[in-house]
Image (tube, rainbow, N blue to C red):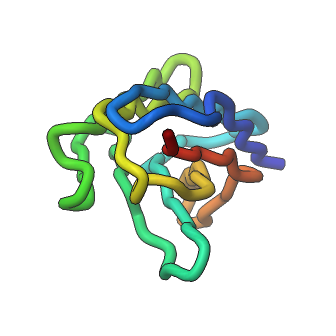
Amino acid sequence: QVQLVESGGGLVQPGGSLRLSCAASGISSSLGTMGWYRQAPGKQGELVAQISSSGTTYYVGSVKGRFTLSRDNAKNTVSLQMNSLKPEDTAVYYCTASVTGATFWGQGTQVTVSS
């Protein structure tokens, strides 16, 4: 079955950077859109960024200019480079991937931005 394994979360000071990575395995057909959602305590979850198989990207307004999403189709990986991090970016970040119309989720990785 499809599995998504995330890495790269952690604790960083405001203004710092982190890079999240996600590797998909068990893919038996074309891997579609990949992306990252985040869930902060007491807040509604939101789509942070996503990238189609052809490379078209979407970013939520609050991260535009700070986060960059990329993917390697040969390796079935997606990475989220997060710069100029703010305390409000603190959340559990989940990798998602679409495969033949079904959406799969990773286990989540914690990102904490605090001094």
Outermost right residue: 1
Question: Is 28 positioned to the left or the right of 78 in the image?
Answer: right
Q: Identify the residue at horizontal 66%, vertical 58% (top origin).
A: 104
Answer whether residue 78 is visible to the viewer in this image: no
Q: What's the residue at 50%, 44% (across, down)?
A: 113
Q: Quadrant of residue 67?
A: top left
Q: Is residue 16 visible?
A: yes
Q: Which residue is outermost to the front? A: 115
Q: Position of residue 70 (x, y in %)?
A: 36, 29
Foreground of the two, 54 or 85: 85
Relative to 115, say whether 21 is above or below.
above
Residue in view at x 40 percent, y 59 percent = 88
Relative placement, left or right, of 55 versus 87 is: left
Q: Residue 56: which quarter of the image? A: top left
- Residue 100 image point, x, y percent: 57, 58
**Relative to 94, is 62 on the left or the right?**
left
For the residue pair 38 and 71, the one nearer the viewer reads as 38
Seen at 38% across and 56% down, the residue is 48
Which quarter of the figure has residue 66? top left
| Image label count | 0
- Nearer to us in this view, 37 or 55: 37
Q: Residue furthest top?
A: 74
Residue sitting nearer the eye, 36 or 13: 13
On the image, the x and y values in percent for residue 36 come to 48, 51
Q: Position of residue 3 (x, y in %)?
A: 77, 44
